[in-house]
Image (cartoon, helix red, strand yellow):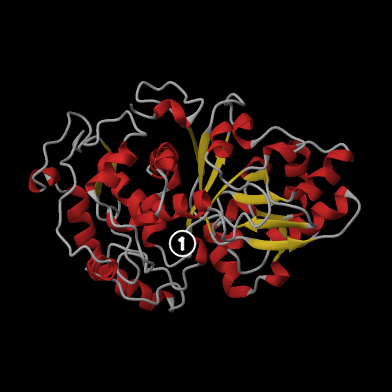
Amino acid sequence: MYVRHPIVSVPHLEMRGRAEPVMAAIVEIATATGAYATTGLHATAGTGRPATAALVERIAVADEPEAIFERFAREGWTDGLPIVPPTEDRVAQMLTFSDLDPSLSLGPMPPRWGEATIATLAVNAVMAGCKPEYFPVIVTAVQAILGKPFNLYGIQGTTNPASPVLIVNGPIAGEIGLNARGNLFGPGFRANATIGRAIRLIMTTIGGGVPQQADKSTLGNPAKYTCCFAENEADSPWAPLHVERGFDAQTSTVTAFGGAAPANIIEKSKTADEMLETIARAVAVSGSNNMFMSQEALVVLGPEHAAIAARQGFDKTRVRQTLFAHARIPFAQIGHSNAEVLSVWRGNCIDEQAGRRTLRVVEKADDIIVVVAGGAGNHSASIPGWYSRSVTLPIVRADGTPIRAVAEMKKK
């Protein structure tokens, strides 16, 4: 059954009238047994899903760029942009940078629940224009977005413009040419553009996140095409994100953060306190995701802003604490109707002092993720979060050993 929009903006009585008819169907689905018996798949014991799945289907298309693109576009296998034809030779080349069985599934991807096999990931990586040496990053990124805390099911179907934001740390980022400096959210860098694009194609072709079908995003955002960058570890005065999360500096990792598009913050103060207060106010914007639904908020500090803070004795912990102290939205800016919603959705983030109510954008200081990236200039960025927790995973071999360089993965 389908509950038509709008939902949140209609009176409660009307909303209840729409919801009640579907409750019986929801209960029936939730309590059904033998659901996997109808899928035709043989589940691995205890997992409810197959450990492996069949390799990708072969199709024949005229060897002409226009014919290939038209076929793929007609089938809904593209993001609207031209693709690189995933020929058997190209897919085989992509697979030379993985020691995993091509038929191995990393898991079912919502909402279609297609199996994310290594082979199908390789097909999408080719389509996106990736070099084969990017493939270990793509495999790790898919594992991250399939992690339960990331809530991919929600991100795929929400009316919100939420989308995966990928942050790569460690030596592999530089080895494959991921941009960590100027224009890192913009064009011009193949690794950034194609790795992020591959994840979007995978979410579409395997997961079924097709716009205006399963993907219900009201407006979308450009980051839904691609959003992948490396932390600028060389110009950061602090330990990078992956080290903060317990990994060795020489271990390469991928962090998947579910959020909206980056919002630029220009700030020309000379003192760290004043600078961070401005940035915090930009993070705490009425009407943003950070007001309604951020489990985490991501702040990308430009190297110049990070240097100002470090010179004045701030480490990352103090930066987060300062941002947290100021990233509050006064209820005077929220409005009565929104205040009612927030009292239910985010009651644990509402503070009251001397009769003045404010909303914290996150529950605690550690929920503000701080990374250093970008080039010269007095700019930083806020990437509002969603009902999602970021997941950081190491780039590893099949046996779990961290990869020190992607060249190690190249099959002879």
| Residue 238: quadrant of the picture | top right
Q: Position of residue 353 (x, y in %)?
A: 78, 55
Q: Quadrant of the C terminus?
A: top left
Compared across the picture, whether 352 is left or right of 94 comes to right
Q: Position of residue 210 (x, y in %)?
A: 32, 65
Q: Position of residue 361 (x, y in %)?
A: 64, 55
- Which amino acid, by three-letter code, is at mark 1? Lys
Q: Residue furthest front?
A: 63
The reply to whether residue 117 is visible in this rendering is no
Q: Is residue 212 above or below residue 165?
A: below
Compared across the picture, whether 329 is left or right of 188 comes to right
Q: Which residue is mark 1?
A: 224
Q: Is residue 358 above or below residue 97?
A: below
Number of dots carrying numbers: 1
Q: At 62% from the left edge and 74% from the top edge, which residue is drawn?
A: 336
Label 1: how many Cα within 10 Å (few below 14, some 14–19, many 20+): many
Compared across the picture, whether 138 is left or right of 87 comes to right
> Could you say which is closer to the camera, residue 397 or residue 58?
58
> Could you say which is closer to the camera, residue 259 or residue 302?
302
Secondary structure category for the residue under label 1: helix
Q: At 42% from the left edge and 74% from the top edge, which residue is drawn?
A: 12
Q: Quadrant of the N terminus?
A: bottom left
Q: At 30% from the left edge and 52% from the top edge, which residue is drawn?
A: 110
The reply to whether residue 323 is visible in this rendering is yes
Q: Position of residue 67 (x, y in %)?
A: 23, 69
